[in-house]
């Protein structure tokens, strides 16, 4: 059947309209993309602070909706396992720190860092600090260790359970030959609240969680686990400088995605987080929170995490550390 000019014109207009609708719908889907960052730590912790800075910046510059989902508990296992089960489509990522590479050594049946997740970016690092109340009689690490030796088991130290903070405590406990009671917490923020209430003697903390308290003078830092003195804490010695142990470690914060996330989604996420980290307006906010940007993305970040897995496994094995 032959079509009239009007019929052909109608068909052409319909085709054009369909094409325009498809383009608009595609652009709209891209600009309103939603990404969820699973944070296996409580609100107000260092990882939570960093994730919210990144979410805000990505939302402003990329037009994406970035949600934060705090899933603390189980030594970060609850949030980590939830992220591992998420659809590998780039819509869910996981904020990771040292516990991510420690858990496989402590809980061999948990997950494989390389097989279960894809590396996106190593965002930042920050010191681990041992803090006490400013009104505490302990002016130095030596004061605390001397008191611990004089009263075995009487002094207590709090930290996030199954974390690099607890590993650092176990290392110093063995190196200094002291007996202090360890009090586990789901994160640093609740541990600090307990310290401020006078219910524990000291806390091993990630610096971003305590920087405000240190600046205001409510807490005092006795030592860091860093390899060198941190410019933000020039008066605070390292483990080596305090004469306790050669062990050194900083906390790292990064982003990973579920295994089998498509390469194009990983590349986009790496670009988004990398750009957010380098944004001029973000730099002073990171510094204010005690976060030191790194920006190692993709395969190099994966290699970094594999080295961390091996190093923590060695320390845990040689020291006989058991973190429940």
Image: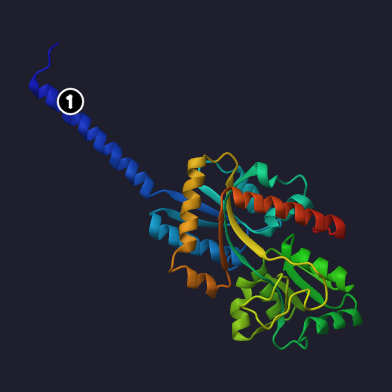
The reply, left or right, for residue 80 in relation to residue 223 is left
Decide: few, some or many residues near mark 1? Use Cα within 10 Å; few <14, some 14-19, many ≥20.
Answer: few
Q: How many marks?
A: 1
The reply, left or right, for residue 9 in relation to residue 37 is left
Q: How is the image coloured?
A: rainbow
**Where's residue 226, x and y in %?**
70, 70
Q: Residue at x 78, y 86 (%)?
A: 138
**Where's residue 242, x and y in %?**
79, 78
Q: Can residue 302 be spotted in the picture?
A: yes
Residue 224 sits in quarter: bottom right
**Where's residue 13, x and y in %?**
17, 31
Q: Residue at x 79, y 81 (%)?
A: 141
Quadrant in the picture for the N terminus? top left
Q: Of helix, strand and loop, which one carries label 1?
A: helix
Q: What residue does disc 1 label?
A: 11
90 over 37 or under it: above or below: above
Q: Nearer the viewer, residue 134 or 120?
A: 120
Q: Identify the residue at the far left of this view.
A: 5
**Where's residue 182, x and y in %?**
81, 69
């Amino acid at each position: 059947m032959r079509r009239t000019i009007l019929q052909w014109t109608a068909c052409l207009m319909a085709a054009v309209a369909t094409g325009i609708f498809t383009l608009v719908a595609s652009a709209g889907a891209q600009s309103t993309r939603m990404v969820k960052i699973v944070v296996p730590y409580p609100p107000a912790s260092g990882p939570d602070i960093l994730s919210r800075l990144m979410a805000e910046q990505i939302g402003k510059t990329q037009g994406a909706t970035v949600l934060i989902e705090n899933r603390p508990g189980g030594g970060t296992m609850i949030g980590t396992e939830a992220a591992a089960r998420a659809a590998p489509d780039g819509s869910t990522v996981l904020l990771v720190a040292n516990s991510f590479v420690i858990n496989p050594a402590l809980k061999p049946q948990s997950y494989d860092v390389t097989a279960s997740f894809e590396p996106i970016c190593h965002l930042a690092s920050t010191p681990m600090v041992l803090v006490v109340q400013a009104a505490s009689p302990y002016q130095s690490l030596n004061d605390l260790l001397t008191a611990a030796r004089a009263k075995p088991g009487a002094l207590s130290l709090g930290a996030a359970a199954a974390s690099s903070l607890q590993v650092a405590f176990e290392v110093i406990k063995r190196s200094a030959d002291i007996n202090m009671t360890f009090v586990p917490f789901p994160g640093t923020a609740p541990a600090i609240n307990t310290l401020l209430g006078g219910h524990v003697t000291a806390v091993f903390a990630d610096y971003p969680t305590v920087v405000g308290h240190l600046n205001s003078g409510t807490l005092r830092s006795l030592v860091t686990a860093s390899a060198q003195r941190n410019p933000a804490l020039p008066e605070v010695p390292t483990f080596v400088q305090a004469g306790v142990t050669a062990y050194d470690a900083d906390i790292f914060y990064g982003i990973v995605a579920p295994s089998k996330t498509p390469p194009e989604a990983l590349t986009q996420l790496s670009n988004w987080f990398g750009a957010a980290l380098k944004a001029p307006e973000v730099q002073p906010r990171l510094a204010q929170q005690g976060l030191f940007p790194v920006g190692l993305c993709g395969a190099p970040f994966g290699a970094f995490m594999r080295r961390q897995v091996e190093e923590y496994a060695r320390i845990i094995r040689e020291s006989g550390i058991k973190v429940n």
